[in-house]
Amino acid sequence: MTALDGVFRREWGPAVAALARWSGDLSVAEDAVQEACAQALRVWPAAGVPANPGAWLTTVARNQALDRLRRESARPGKELAAVYEQVSAPDTAEELHPVRDDELRMMFTCAHPALDRSSQLALTLRLISGLTVSEIARALLQSDSAIGQRITRAKNKIRRANIPLRVPPPELLGERTPHVLGCIYSVFTEGYWSTGGPSAIRDELCDEGVRLAGELCALMPGNRDAHALAALVLLHDSRRRTRVDEGGALIPLDEQDRSQWDRGRIARGLEHLRLAEGALGSYLPQAVIAALHATAPSWQHTDWATICLAYDRLVAMTDSPVAAANRALAVGFRDGFTAGLAALDAVADDPRLARTNTVAPIRADLLRRAGRFDEAQRWYRVALDGSGSEPAAAFLRRRLAECVAS
C-alpha cells in the first residue's frame, strides 16, 4: 500500500462522481480517474502532493476523458462526435433538486429500478467509495467474481438504457431511497469495521458515511428512515476515537473511556433519532441499540433488556443471521452467558453465516465470560483463521493469551 493510498481513497469517489455527471458515462469516468491516479503516482513523489489533490485528479481525469472522446469521435463513422461536443460544451443543465453533491446524485442514479439491489449496491460502493472488489464482496457476502460481474453488467445496463445521471424527480425518490440508505451505511461500516488491511478504522470512510447521511436528511427532511440512519452512524461514530489505542489496537466497548466520547455527535444522533420516530426500516432498532450504549453511564449500567427487545424487532424485520448472532451476545449479558450460548446455537448453523467470521468470536467471548477458558481458546483460534484486519487479529490473539493464562 503506497503512502498516497489514503489520498486516492478520499478523492476517488468525488472525482468519479464529478466526471460521471460531466461525461454521462460511468466507464469513461472511472477509467479517466484511474488514469489520473496513475499519473499522480508518477508526478507527485517528485513534485509533491498538490494543495487540492481532488481538484488536480478531477482536472487531469477530465483532460484524459476529453482526449479519449476526441480520438474516438474522429474514427470512421464518428459515432461519438455528438457525445464529444456535448461534454466539451459548458455545463448549463438545470438540476431538479438543489443538490450540490455529485456523489449523492450518482447514488440515486445507481439506484435505478432497472438494476437489481445487489448490483446497485456493488456499483455504488465501487464508484463512490473506491472500495475494491474484494472489500465489496466481503461486505455483501458474495464472491469476488460475482461482484466483478455485477459491476460490469450494471455499468453496461446504465449505458445501454441511457439512464440519466441525476437525482430523480420527487415522485421517484421513494423507490430509490432504500438503496441510497443501504449504500451510505455500507460505506460507514467499512470505515468503522475495516474488513482488511493494517487499520481497524478508515477515518475517511467514516467521515464520508456521516456526511452523506446528513446530505440525505437535508435533501429529504421528512424521511424518517434517513433520520434513523443518520442517528445510527452518528451514535456509532461518537465512539470512534476511543475504539483504538495510540498503537492502533482495538479497545472493546466495555473498556472504552466514555468521558472521551463525542457528546456533540451523541446529541445530534439523539435528535435524528427523535425525528426518526415511526420509521419502518431496520435502521431504527439499530439506532436504538446504539443510543442505549451511547447514553449508558457505564458498562455495568447498560440496559440489556431494552437492547434485547430492539434486537428482537431487528431480527423479526430482517431475518438477518448476523443480527441474531449479535443478539445472542446481548442475551448473554441479560440472562447469563449460558443462555447467550444457547441463543447462539439456535442460529450458528445458518448457511448465510458461512462466509462471515461472526459466530466464532461471539462464541469465544461468551465462553470466556462464562469462565470456560479451554473451550474459549479453541474458538478464538477458529476466529483467528477468519480474521480480516490486522488489529482485529491482534485483539483476538490478546483474548486467546488471556484465556491461556487463566
Image (spheres, helix red, strand yellow):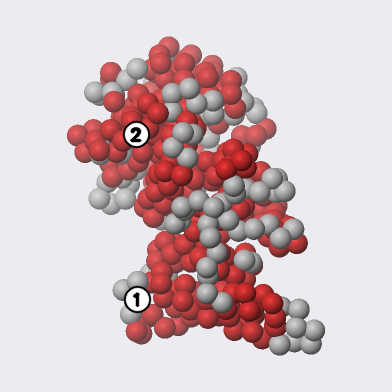
Q: Look at the image and tell me in which quarter the C terminus lies.
A: top left
Give x and y (percent) for residue 399. Answer: 38, 36
Q: Quadrant of residue 106?
A: bottom right
Say whether residue 278 is left or right of residue 51: right
- Which residue occupies 50% across, 65% down? 18
**Residue 100 visible in the current orientation:** yes
- Which residue occupies 47% across, 27% down? 284
Give x and y (percent) for residue 259. Answer: 19, 34
Give x and y (percent) for residue 4. Answer: 40, 70
**Mark carried by residue 269:** 2
Disc 2 residue crowd, few under 14, some 14–19, many 20+, Cα 10 Å: many
In the figure, 268 relative to 8: above or below?
above
- Which residue occupies 53% across, 19% down? 313
Disc 1 residue crowd, few under 14, some 14–19, many 20+, Cα 10 Å: some
> Which residue is under mark 1?
49
Residue type pointed to by label 1: Val
Q: Quadrant of residue 254?
A: top left
- Which residue occupies 28% across, 45% down? 241
Viewer-side label of 2, 1: 2
